[in-house]
Image (cartoon, grey):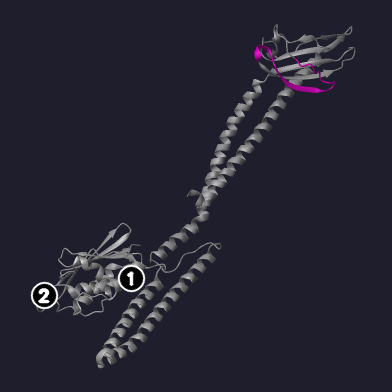
Amino acid sequence: MFFRSVGFRLIFLSIAWIGVALLAGGKVLGQHFRTHVQNSFDIGLTRHVQEVLSYAEVVDGQLKLIRRPTDPSFTRPLSGWYWEVVQKGKVLERSRSEWDETLALPQRVPAQGEKLGFFIDGPREQRLRVVGKTVSLPGLKDNITVYFTGPAKVIETAMEEFRETLMTSLLVLGGGLAFAVILQVILGLRPLKLLRRRLAAVHAGEVDRLTGRYPTEVEPLVTDLNELLDHNAQVIERARTHAGNLAHALKTPLAVLSNEADLMDGKSGHMLREQVSVMNELVTRHLARARASGGLGAPGLKTDIGDIAAGLKRTLERIYVHRGPEDGEGIKISLVNVRGQFVIGDRQDIEEMLGNLMDNACKWSAGRVRVRVDLVGRDTVIKVDDNGPGVPQDKWADVLERGKRLDEGTPGSGLGLNIVHDLAEMYLGSIALGASDLGGLSVTLTLPAP
């Protein structure tokens, strides 16, 4: 899941590259520093070689040192600081610091004028750095080689101190670079996060267009999305307009045919009335579905249930003002927990579904209708109850069938609940019938919440 994030990929790859670069750089710096320390150490030993050579004299063909190196390290026993003057494998002179030990010098002797540096294991297994130089002195038959040694621990100690400083510096540098990368990615991707929030607001129905200022790289995308939203809204509006025009165009001829059928007697008149009724049902049903499918899936489909329920309550109470149990007493519709409740759907479609349910409840009610809305998980549950005679449980499935009416004496086409059922399914919802605690029928409409 993390690797699907562009920000995580950028941060991960950048930090990985920084880590590799710092490790490689640290290794190169460490190697160069070791070479530098070792060369500096060798230069110091070479100075002592030159010092010994400056003290050398040849007397009767024999090498004599008029003085010895003044550094006290070369007199302290087994200090690691040693020197020897060798001629043809024979030690002519050596430092007092060797005590009674000898140096395990290699067989290879530096050529005349050559300076040779190498490591050996000295007395007491002490690692030593050695610098040797072969020279020719006037009066001497054979060349002599001067060797000076120093503890290799001096070099390793300097390397350890350098590694600690280098590691600390690289960690601080790496942390700073990682922080800079994270900050850069966050600031660089902020316009995309803003765009995502604005798109969420469009889907939630809070706004109908993408607003705000965006970088030049994102601005063309925002413009295209706004044009797409405008085009989608125009297409939906045209579809609704065409559906309404078609409804009006068909209603008039069907009304004429229905009037003519009423004037006809016999089987022909009866058959014509049945076919006109079927056409009316089909027009009503399919136009409702066409209107709903035109807006289905469009962004911003968010409808306030409380506002719709309050408007239907005022209208229906006026229509059924004389439908109460006693003269002069009308239907009372109570709204419970409807304020601030929303569903995903077009207002006209939600109004038609809720209007059908409330109108059906008022037709069969004995004076009381209740509309209650609850948020259950990610769904908005709308319950419409009445205190009418109700519907037997074995008839609940029949009520939802197209054009099915249990009482032919009550006005209506019998399409109301079936249209609600179709629209609810199109919005990924459902409708269910049950027994109401008021004594009548309870209809539960479930629709997705925003």
- Look at the numbered discs 2 and 1 and tell me whether their residues touch, using CB distance below 8 Å: no
Q: Amino acid at mark 2?
A: Pro
Q: Amino acid at mark 1?
A: Asp
- Left or right of 50: which side holds 212? left
- Marker disc for residue 145: none
Q: Is residue 120 magenta?
A: yes
Find residue 325 and name its label: 2
Image point (62%, 41%), residue name: 21
Residue at image coords 26%, 89%? 267
Residue tagged 1? 422
Identified at 31% across, 71% down, the residue is 350
Q: Which residues are magenta?
A: 105-125
Residue 403 seen anywhere in this rendered image of the structure: yes
Q: Nearer the viewer, residue 339 or 265?
A: 265
Compared with residue 420, is residue 196 higher up or lower down, i.e. above or below?
above
Left or right, 382 with respect to 301, comes to: left
Residue 428 horizontal/vertical position (percent): 35, 64
- State which tag comes first along the sequence, 2 or 1: 2
Q: Is residue 146 above or below residue 15?
A: above
Q: Is residue 351 visible?
A: no
Q: 237 or 96: nearer the eye?
A: 237
Where residue 230 appears, as percent x and y from the top left, is 46, 73
Q: Is residue 96 magenta?
A: no
